[in-house]
Image (cartoon, rainbow, N blue to C red):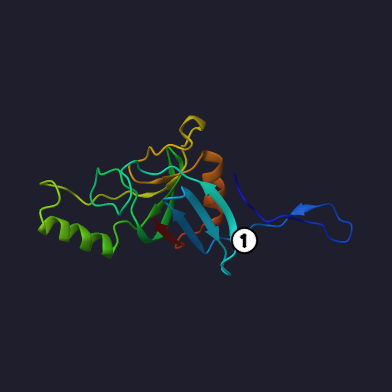
Amino acid sequence: MVLAASALLLLGAPARAAPAARAARVLVDKRAHTLTLFDGRGDVIAVFPVSLGPGGSGPKQREGDMRTPVGRYHVTMHQPSVYKVFLRLDYPNREDWARFRRLEREGELPKGARIGGDIGIHGGTAPSLRGQDWTLGCVAVDDAQIAEIARLVPDGTVVDIEE
């Protein structure tokens, strides 16, 4: 379900949906399985259900752990994808690298582990997969929703992924 601004009726003119504002911030709530778009004033533009990586809670530790990362990221580019559109995030960031190096030093990672990359927001959630976590760590919505998100979220937008 998408929440959007209600239609406006002005001076007897036909009702027409107000144009959606560009998003200034994206919030992914892993626990609630939602992606919320906020405008520059902090008002909600839209909310989308999401699928995540099935690796569980907590930050992504390494490539292959199937976790969706936790932290502050930015959309670096919009790319065509087998999942319709891929909004690439700047994972790993400085905090992710610091955690990875600490886990390496403490022997918490398998030998030869890599931090990974290619994390983003994309389409591809088929109706049969709604409500299921299936990605390798990305945030997924259905194809119609990613088209709308890509239209509203410019490169450089802050993406906060929280538990």
Task: Say above or below: 149 vs 105.
Answer: above
Count of marks placed on residues? 1
> Residue 34, how many percent across, how many down?
49, 50
| Residue shown at the point (71%, 57%) measured from the top left | 18
Q: Quadrant of residue 52?
A: top left
Q: Is 75 or 67 nearer to us in this picture?
A: 67
Quadrant in the picture for the C terminus: bottom left
Which x, y percent locates residue 67? 31, 47
Q: Relative to 128, is 45 on the left or the right? A: right
| Residue found 46% across the figure and 59% down from its top | 155
Mark 1 packing: few (<14 Cα in 10 Å), some, or many (20+)? Answer: some
Kindly identify the residue that appears in the image at 46 percent across and 47 percent down: 33
Q: Say left or right for 95 vs 42.
A: left
The location of residue 64, given as percent across then percent down, is 25, 42
Q: Report which residue position mark 1 lands on.
A: 21
Residue 143: give x, y in percent of width and height: 52, 39
